[in-house]
Amino acid sequence: TQPKAYRAAILHSLGDPARVGLEASHAYYPDGVLVVADGHVRDIGPAEEVLARQPADIELVRFEHKLITSGFVDTHIHFTQTEMIASYGEQLLDWLNNYTFPEERKFADPDHARRVAGLFLDELLRNGTTTAMVFGTVHKAAVDAFFSESDQRNMRMIAGKVLMDRHAPDYLLDTPESGYADSKELIERWHNQGRQLYAVTPRFAPTSTPEQLTLAGRLLAEYDDVYMQTHLSENRKEIEWVAELFPEQNGYLDVYDHFGLLGERSIFAHAVHLDDHECERLHGTGSGVSFCATSNLFLGSGLFNLARFERHGVNVSLGTDVGAGTSFSLLQTMNEAYKVLQLQQQKLHPLKAFYLATLGGAESLRLADRIGNLEVGKEADFVVLDLHATPLMQARMNNAHNLFEQLFVLMMLGDDRVVAETYVYGNCLHRKNA
Ligand code: GUN
Ligand code: FE
């Protein structure tokens, strides 16, 4: 296809500020141009320099008061909980029993699954999220429908069928054998099909028997590049329950470790209550943790300790965890993450927050060679953020004197209202007010 050029302020992440320093962590072009062709980034840099390298008649789109950045990466979310977001009043285990399981039951119907998958993916796009790691339900056909919808949009999604064979209502249970066979079928059909990727998805330790966790480990051994996603140490009562269920194991993470579920393509959501030994083990195995700030506040789970993970060199990324999370927006997730860290006397620099929501997610998912920033050759997933989206934002931005302040205002005040356009593989899939 013909190349297309986009002119606006451009920011993208080049590394973790905690590892490479603030200066080297990003590239910023106050007047920049991004050139896209065939779904990939072909050029990026200061406008005059980039345009001088392009044919004079290149199609050029010019934005005012906008910031282009790479698409957001959400490393933990449940598509099947879209229509139960904002369910009142419980902490984790009661929330699961009273709201979540009955909601997930509806996904036995593939038509319901297809409709909600479409709604969910469009909502991600409205919020500037172009890649997510997604839980389905126990139902194979629901995950099949999800991948179909994602494939149609050509979005890079990682998803999986939930494995759960105990401690939930009968209508949501599989068996070790059926869970294994269904997962295998989905892997064969969808893993690396277009941009789709599969994650073996045991819900969490309490809802899987040792037999099922053994077979989850077998799947990971059989397919060396499939992912693993689960929940870890979110809530105190959950942790006590795991200790009762797995008395042989030395703590919650050790349960997953015992069954071979740690590794470079494993993401553990929450990880709120861990000890240093567990952080060390996460680091040693290349496993990642997903910081789900709005969810941890909503369910009263606890405060994620970012500094500790940084100290141990653990890969951290951001998750919305909808439906326990209260927003699809990674900007709102940065906002709440900032406050979670404030309560622990920690800071979250806006460049760190943007790193976590983009390249940090891609690195945790081992996809940084394809997505996460806008370097030449990367897949062209990007967003156009409107710095003047509301009268208040416009007034505040006019009073912001540098990139640092602009970004901080975006992460405090921004949400879906600031996402003017979202591009997936070079195609505009969301345009605000269009
Ligand atoms: N732990 C087990 N299942 C879930 C879930 O659906 N959401 C959250 N936040 N935690 C869980
Ligand atoms: Fe979750």
Image (cartoon, grey):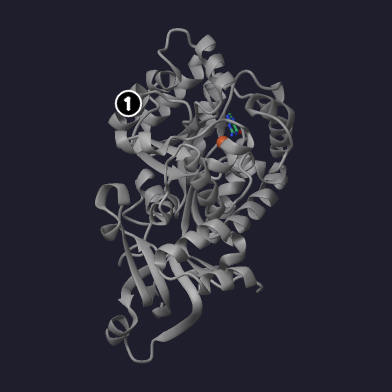
Q: Position of residue 292 (x, y in %)?
A: 52, 40
Residue 152 position by quadrant: bottom right
* Foreground residue among 399 and 378: 399
Whole-percent x and y of residue 216? 45, 26
| Residue at x-position 51% and y-position 72% | 399
Residue identified by numbered label 1: 281
Camera-nearest residue between 208 and 414 = 414
- Does label 1 point to a residue whose CB lies under 8 Å from ligand 1? no
Q: Is residue 69 above or below residue 205?
A: below
Q: How many marks?
A: 1
Residue 34: image quadrant is: bottom left
- Is 316 drawn above or below residue 101 in the view shown? below
From this viewpoint, which residue is outermost toward the bottom? 56
Q: Picture coordinates of residue 213 (x, y %)? A: 47, 21
Q: Is residue 136 visible?
A: no
**What's the residue at 57%, 66% (across, down)?**
418
Of residues 133 and 10, the one drawn nearer to the viewer in this rendering: 10
Please state, as top left, top right, bottom left or bottom right, where the C terminus lies in the image: bottom right
Residue 98 in view, yes or no = yes
Q: Which residue reaches farthest top?
A: 248
Which of the two residues, 429 or 402, is positioned nearer the viewer here?
402
Residue at x-position 27% and y-position 84%: 53
- Judged from the image, the secondary structure of the residue bearing numbered disc 1 is helix
Amino acid type, label 1: Arg
Residue 132 in percent (x, y) is at 50, 49
The quadrant holding residue 255 is: top left
In which quadrant of this rendering is ligand 2 seen? top right
Disc 1: CA contacts within 10 A as few (<14), some (14-19) or many (>=20): some
- Pick the quarter of the image with the N terminus: bottom left
Residue at the image point whose x is 42% and y is 56% from the top: 350
In the picture, measured across the screen, residue 112 lies left or right of residue 318, that is right
